[in-house]
Amino acid sequence: MSRAPGMSVRLKLTVSYAAFLLLAGALLLAAVWVFLLRYVPDRALLIGADPGSTGVFPVRSNLLHVFAPRAAAVLGFVLLFGLVGGWVLAGRILAPLTQIADAARTTGQGSLAHRIRMQGRRDEFRELSDAFDSMLDQLESHVAEQQRFAANASHELRTPLAISRTLLDVARKDPTRVRGELIERLHTVNQRAIDLTEALLVLSRGDRGDFTREGVDLSLLAEETAETLLPLAERRRIKLEVTGGAARTTGSPQLLLRMVTNLVQNAIVHNVPTDGTVTVRTESHGDTSVLRVENTGRRLPPELLPTLTEPFQRGTERVRTDEHAGAGLGLAIVHSIVRAHDGSLDLGPGPTGGLRVTVRLPGTP
């Protein structure tokens, strides 16, 4: 935004300091006039009672003639002293602000590694400096996360495209190849690319948080999800249970349904070995609505749990089938949606193995 040039803050402080001193000097001179000179007679008085005196009192006009030039000189010195002293003091006071401005310009040029780290006791400028450093820390972390996410996303999208290209090259070189098998494999690969793209869009939408909030009952979403994923659970010989009561919150019904679907599908797919159980429970505790999804299976290494919500982190101990190869975005999307709804996501091992995921969202009556 272009702005008209104006006075710097340092110059404004200097002028203000000098004007204050000048006003204080003028008020002092006014006090001298009000409480002293006004009582001096304007005409000479002759007194002959005391032979040792001259017999003449000072006259107001003579005092003013002598006092006025010297008062003006003092006011001029006060003004000059105020300007010089104000300029120096303003420079010392605004020196931390100059550091912050230099850091902001460095950041604007693309360097996020610079920090102010202002020394000294805590005051307004130190608080501003610490807040700026904290903002740079978060910004640098966010940019690094976005760069890593973009690199991973491009890699994941490149894989199905490369497979499609290979299949087409094979079909072009071998026209006798069975077309039905080729079309089926191309359909599978393209569907994976579509699913990955949709997952990236959902993840981006959840991070932005720009959605209309409505009243939602998590228990109804859990029942709808269980009905949708029941065939998948039956094919894998997984027992799917939905228990608990109403758990009302506010948010996007579509995003919250995607959250519940991802959690339940993730619990079914990673329930190894088969013949296990997936339990979905909803409940309300005061002003908090809770959704808990738990499956059976092998015990997960503790060091694996913190990485499960990172994009494209599948985990070496987690087993997937070709039918649901996934893109490593399931729990990342869940984490993004929960964060956008001002909730919390906790991952922990189940009592006998598997994974227990607990989502807490702000409840509504």
Image (spheres, rainbow, N blue to C red):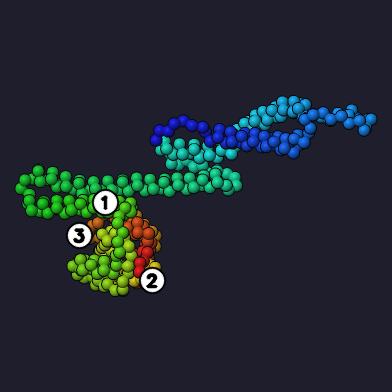
Which of pointers 1 and 2 lies earlier in the amino acid sequence? 1
The circle on residue 201 is 1
Labelled pair 1, 2 in contact (Cβ < 8 Å): no
Q: Distance between the Cα atoms at labels 1 and 2? A: 32 Å
Q: Which residue is mark 3?
A: 323
Residue drawn at (14%, 47%) of the image: 167
Does dot 2 land on a helix, a strand or a loop?
strand
Q: Earlier in the sequence, mark 1 or mark 3?
A: 1
Camera sees residue 332: no
Q: Is residue 131 above or below residue 315?
A: above
Q: Looking at the picture, how far across and down is residue 253, in whole percent?
A: 27, 61
Amino acid type assigned to the residue bearing label 3 in the image: Glu
- Discs 3/2, front: 2
Q: What residue appears at the point 27 percent right and 46 percent down from the top-left corner?
A: 154
- How many marks the image carries: the answer is 3
User: Which of pointers 3 and 2 lies earlier in the amino acid sequence?
Assistant: 2
* Residue at the image point whose x is 18% and y is 67% from the top: 231
Rounded to the nearest angstrom, the CA distance separating label 1 from label 3 is: 22 Å
Q: Position of residue 238 (x, y in %)?
A: 23, 70
Residue 1 at x, y percent in the picture: 39, 35
Identified by mark 2, the residue type is: His
Q: Amino acid at mark 1?
A: Leu
Q: Which residue is mark 2?
A: 285
Q: Is the C terminus in the top left, top right, bottom left or bottom right quadrant?
A: bottom left
Please state which of residues 332 and 155 is positioned toward the viewer in this rendering.
332
Marks 3 & 2, CB-CB < 8 Å contact: no
